[in-house]
Image: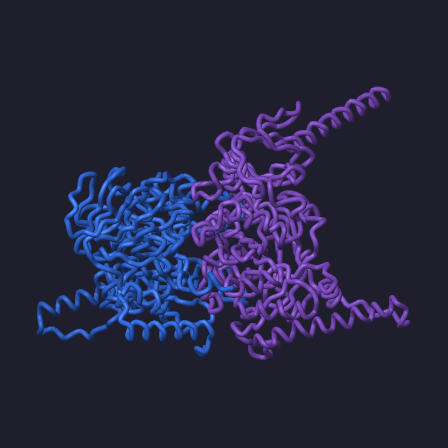
Chain colours: A blue, B purple
Amino acid sequence: MKITNYELRITNFILLVGLLLSSVFCLPSSVAAQSDGSQQNVIGRAGTFAITNARIVTVSGAVIENGTVLIQDGKIAAVGANVSVPGNAERIDGKGLSVYPGMIDAGTNMGLAEITLGANATMDLIESGDMNANAKAITGINPHSSHINVTRVNGITTVLSYPAGGVISGQAAVINLWGATQNEMAVVPTFGLVINFPRIATFSGFGQPQLEFSEAVKRRDQRLEDLKKVFKDAESYGRIRDAYAKDKTLPAPKTDLKLEAMVPYVRGEKPVIFTAERERDIRGVIKFIEETKVKGIIVGGQEAWKAGDGLKRNNIAVIYTNIYNLPVRDDDSYDYLFEAPSKLQQAGVKFAIATGDGGGEVRDLPYHAGLAGAYGLSKDDALKSVTLYPAQILGIADRLGSIEQGKIANIVVTDGDLLEPRTNIKYLFINGRLLPLTSRHTELYEQFKDRK
Amino acid sequence: MKKQIIFFLLVALCLANANLSVLAQSKTEILIRNATILTAAKGTLENSDILIQNGKIARIGKNLNAPANAQIIDASGKFVSPGIIDCHSHSMLDAINEFSFSVTSMTTVKDALNPRDISIYRALAGGVTAGNLLHGSANSIGGLNAVVKFKWGKPVEDFLVSDAPPGIKFALGENPKRTHVQVQPGQTARYPRTRMGVMETIRDAFVRAREYKQSWDDFRAKKTKIQPRTDLELQPLVEILEGKRLVHAHGYRSDEHLNLMMLADEFGFKIATLQHGLEAYKIAPEIAKHGAGVSIFVDSWSYKLEAYDSIPYNAAILWKNGVSVSINSDSDERMRRLNLDAAKVMKYGGVPEEEALKMITLNAARQLGIDKRTGSVEVGKDADLVIWNAHPFSVYSRPEMTLIEGEIFFDRTKDIQRRAELERERQELEKLDVNKPAGGGTTQPRIPSEKRTEDRDEASFQDGGNN
């Protein structure tokens, strides 16, 4: 599609005006940022900040009813009821406000899919072919996607972004929702290998007749065999490569980027993220993991609780993405998918709640968690399911997911319960930088709110 | 022997009558006690009761006396709101788009209603009691609508709100242009393909309708002798010109909605609702002047190009300009959480609580012309009510009970009680030969497909066509 669209022209116009303003008048960065039109590349302000007299929801420990959080050098320097505030610190009065760790959405395609329909040039989600282990989300994520600001101003500061399509989609990245470059955003640039676990699908394309069930089973089995073969090939590839490294008299192996990319995953050094929803597919993943000894995570997980024993036994966590989804069967109870997180918890399975969204609606993460809270999960666990639990599953709990001394200062200050839709975000920190609460949405609001 | 039979019949008749009267009373008289009532019209009432008689709200007040046979519902610590009205839905529809022409005003969704669509029950479980069921957005002028109450378990004719003014779906922009749909080999692209063509398609239809109307006026005034042939396509458009049929016009970009309002002004009618109106905030003063309502997605955006300028402040800007705003779902999934969508407009632009609640209740009723009977908790209105465990704008809230015209159509406690029994039944059915996997395979029994529908219109865009 030719980019002659009216909205894009407006965006370009704003961009131009913004550039002119900032270059000609040399406005301070925070002001210029609001009109630079790039939507995301707002630098914010680093410094030493003390949020005082606030209710601090640490998540990992008890709530501190009246305390201080000190932010210094991008980190949480101190937290507690009696924290001494250095003289150079900028004080933020937190009276009546609550301080939370930034939320983490462990199931998104953030930055890879700007406009799903009618703007294919903005889509970097699905590579062609079935086996794409070397496709890395971190090289496709657009740091200037307008989804990024819109998401973070609702309190989500870190996401897992993964590619889609094929059988092996590529490698997912853990990113902070701040940064002018992919490097600046990266928390774990290549976190996990995404595999769409082969399933029985009778759907064969829009307008196409459905496949016979037995044919669909055959195709699933074939795809599973193909996947196992790729795993074996990658293991062999790794062994040959290692052997050559030790003994250069052996014939030099040819580099294969796709197999090369898989080596750490087939060796269980890094996690494989399997998309799977139905019980039989979840059980299929468990069997696959038991056979291949890979480190596994499930994303999706509609019926994962039904296979809770196998998940628990193999220490497989579930990134649950089905709150905004309808039960598949007519006779499933109406709250079947709202209740699933509490059932996962009862089964002793490690889990997180995620949106599963392409980017634009990731900002609804708190409501996904809250709805699970309305249907069985405790409020405390609902909050953990979008903060500490995803941090643990993503292997970043030493740096993120709670308010503890030494962690990265991704912090949200609110006027109420973080998961409630009426709650307002008052301050936002990522990497200890105080960020303006602006986005494509606030910019358009400012332009039109007083039009007569 | 004969006497005995007659006696038996008489007894049976009496018993039957007695049963009927008991049923009738329990159906029509309910006292909801000690609730926090969000009226959506006259503020919030603490610790108050609602007496329901004959399907209507008979009294609202404190410490109301319960009639002898009334069913008492203790709502202490709970909230009561009006039933939610979804002003844009395709639930119950076995077919949504008649794609063949760009003007299909001869069709009606009333011919495609499925009263057993499970989404009805799920809507009730989300506190939704009524919906505006619309034809899809593939056509410049689509089919006729149906305004229904979600009376799950009743025959389809009971769903229709009999005194709702009739309506029709229009559509502008990407969807009626069909430029996002691949033209199959052997087919020619349908006219129109541009926003210019869409507007001319609508203009042409109204020019024809005006001439058609004139031919009838002339005939009735005896200026002509031959009765004009009835035109099923143009008849609904004549009703629009006469102000008897409400136009619900799908559109995203502000320019296309503005052009439609100008066209309507030219032909002397009003657009009842601008549906979606993702950029309506850009033309709020013009909308207020025309007098159209706007029925929006609260914050959906970016899933297609024409949705890129959509902002969650849309409702607030429109509301400040005095425009009637409703928040719709257009989705069987989203329908279940419209209460949270309404809560969002308090955050984005500071719409007051009751005004936000109206956007999913009274305003939708007004836009559909059914506000005399539903949309708020007021004496004399239909008892379309939801009892919530917490304030419906809280994310932790859930409907406990949903009533339509004084009848309980959803009861969470009973729903939970039945689950074990349903699970047993399911397991027994799965054991039957007919449900075993094909070819003696070892996989689980196949799952019946969810429903018999085509693409779910806008909802399908957001779900990537998975519906």
- Quarter of the image for the N terminus of chain A: give it: bottom left
Whether residue A450 is visible to the viewer of this picture, yes or no, is yes
Q: Is residue B191 left or right of residue A293?
A: right
Q: Nearer the viewer, residue A17 or A347?
A: A17
Residue visible at 55% across and 50% down? B359
**A140, above or below B244, in the image:** below
Q: Is residue B234 left or right of residue A18?
A: right
Whether residue B415 is visible to the viewer of this picture, yes or no, is no
Q: Is residue A411 left or right of residue A449?
A: left
Residue A198 at x, y percent in the picture: 38, 59
Q: Nearer the viewer, residue A139 or A207?
A: A139
Picture quadrant where residue A185 is located:
bottom left
Q: Nearer the viewer, residue B145 or A44?
A: A44
**B1, above or below B262, in the image:** above
Residue A5 at x, y percent in the picture: 46, 75
Q: Is residue A422 left or right of residue A207?
A: left
Picture quadrant where residue B50 is located:
top right
**A371, above or below B169, in the image:** above
Residue B116 at x, y percent in the picture: 62, 48
Residue visible at 62% across and 28% down? B71
Residue A49 at x, y percent in the picture: 21, 52
Q: How many marks?
A: 0
**B287, above or below B52, in the image:** below
